Amino acid sequence: MVEEVAVVNKSKERFEVLLEEIKDKVQLVLEGHDVLRSEMKQMGTDLRSEMRQMGTDLRSEMKQMENNLRFDMSKLDQKIGFVHDSLKKEINLSNDILSEQIKEVDSKLDRHIAQPAHG
């Protein structure tokens, strides 16, 4: 019976050692999970921060592009206005020249018709 008690005690000691080792390993796994959870939380925080910054940067870029487009449109409007004014002057000048030439032709025709051969 003493031998049986000794075997039981030895088995109990081994079992306790094994339990202690398992407990240590489970503790390591739990700590690893805590570290992973913490890192994942930090990654989420970092990602949200980067996305907010990207949104801010994108809005800023869009605003700059909008301002550039407005500036370019304004310059284009000025150029169109200049071309319009220039063409209007050219047309008016051409109209004046043509009017003078028509008056000259009209005058020549009137003189020609007034000649005795047409009378």
Image (spheres, rainbow, N blue to C red):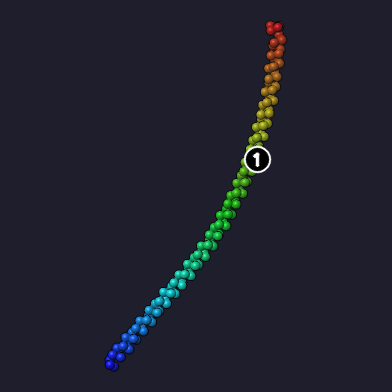
**Residue at 63% over, 46% down:** 71
- 89 versus 17 height, above or below: above
Q: Residue 12's image quarter?
A: bottom left
- 11 versus 51 height, above or below: below
**Residue at 60% over, 46% down:** 69
Q: In the rendered view of the protein, which quadrant contains the N terminus?
A: bottom left
Which residue position is annotated with label 1?
78
- In the visual, does 56 lie left or right of 27? right
- In the visual, does 93 lie left or right of 30? right
Q: Residue 72's image quarter?
A: top right
Residue 56 placed where, x, y %?
Answer: 57, 57
Please count the marks in the image.
Answer: 1
For the residue labelled by badge 1, is the local secondary structure a helix, a strand or a loop? helix
Q: In the rendered view of the protein, which quadrant contains the C terminus?
A: top right
Residue 11 placed where, x, y %?
Answer: 32, 86
- 110 versus 76 height, above or below: above
Residue 113 placed where, x, y %?
Answer: 69, 10
**Residue at 47% over, 69% down:** 37
Q: Residue 114's image quarter?
A: top right
Amino acid residing under circle 1: Gln
Dot 1 alpha-carbon crowd within 10 angstroms: few under 14, some 14 to 19, many 20 or more: few
Question: In the orientation shown, which residue stands out farthest toward the front?
Answer: 1
Question: In the orientation shown, which residue stands out farthest toward the bottom?
Answer: 2
Residue 111 placed where, x, y %?
Answer: 71, 12
- 111 versus 59 height, above or below: above
